[in-house]
Amino acid sequence: MAVSAADVKKLRQATDAPMMDCKKALTETDGDFDKAMEWLRDRGIAQAAKKADRVAAEGALGLKVADTFTSASIVEINSETDFVAKNDGFQKLVGDTVAHIFTTGVSEINQLNETAYETGTFSEYFTQSVARIGEKIEVRRFVTLNAKENGAVNGYIHSNGRVGVLVAAQCDSEKTAELIAPTLKNIAMHAAAMKPTVLSADEFDPKFVEEETQGRIEAIKNENEELARLGKPLKNVPQFISRIQLNAEVMAAAEEAIKAELKAEGKPEKIWDKIVPGKLDRFVADNTTLDKEQALLEQNYVMDDSKTVAQAIADEAKAHGGTAEIVEFIRYEVGEGIEKKVDDFAAEVAAQMA
């Protein structure tokens, strides 16, 4: 049957599918509008299947924070190219997806796909959007943080859309939780830039710390050999790299070593109690480099490096007459952990000419 331009326009407005696809859908279904929409959905699924072997390692993050700062969601949606990730259609898809995750409270991708969305399921909406954009696109991961009683959650996504963080805190009161919400966003910005891998040093695997200690000590020794050759000051070689290694025995030995040093320097014993604490603090600082690099609470706060992140949130809460501590954070970076395909253009051309 003949398909009118008005029918094609109507189907295009309803689906946003390409004009020729709309015309073909109506032709294949004898002008039945509903069947034509189904035909387009099926075609979208087929297109997605053809792209299944491609690697989607680009993309963007989406963020949704409750106006009350009691919950927040973050999602990573991957595309094949950075160009598509900046497309308005892709950005809308990211925004719609994180808003739906936030509203429904789903925790798994299968659950997300099966939820009702507009006139069908979310999976159908997503597939149609992917078909219009024309690349392999997929929801990789998402999470929602919900604050407990007297808690707060906030988040931040960097301007490039590729790095995002959620931060949750527990406070003494609902009032304190509300007042520290802006600081939580600042701490999320800190985490986006400083790349912590754990909340506190207590979360480190002892075996990892032990192996990392040996590696770092050897690296500094090798660097010192070169510095010595150049006649430059040598770097301090630490004994340890994390607070979890500084048990009571270690700290007692460090204190005795400091006292022995003061005695050798001829410092009066009556003033040792004024000197020892500062030197112990220095010992801790020199022997917790891993914590400063990878444990959020122990990192120096970028907005005031005289404080750790833990001290910054505690001081902010104290200024409002309350208490607060960070209890959880989530950091996403687009494509992290995905092995990107490296194309061998010469081999591809040779294969086509064979």
Image (spheres, helix red, strand yellow):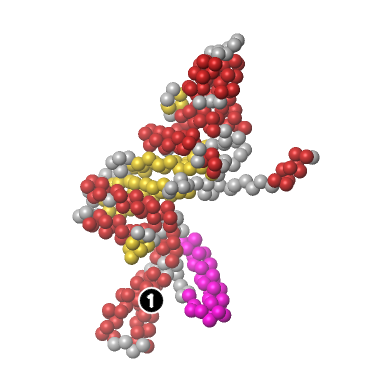
Name the residue carrying label 1. 254
- Locate the C terminus and report the quarter of the image it occupies: top right
Q: Which residue is rendered at x = 72% and y = 43% of the image?
A: 348
Q: Which residue is rendered at x = 42% and y = 25% of the image?
A: 118
Front residue of this view, candidates 328 and 188: 188
Front residue of this view, candidates 346 and 174: 346
Amino acid type at image mark 1: Ala
Q: Which residues are magenta?
A: 206-235
Identity of the residue furthest to the bottom in this view: 266
16 shown above or below 78: above
Query: Percent x, y for residue 216?
Result: 51, 68
Query: Percent x, y for residue 18?
Result: 56, 26
Query: Percent x, y for residue 170?
Result: 29, 50
Q: Is 114 part of what is drawn in magenta?
A: no
> What secondary structure predominates along the stretch shown in magenta?
helix
Front residue of this view, candidates 134 and 246: 134
Secondary element type, mark 1: helix
Q: Is 232 part of what is drawn in magenta?
A: yes
Identity of the residue furthest to the left in this view: 321
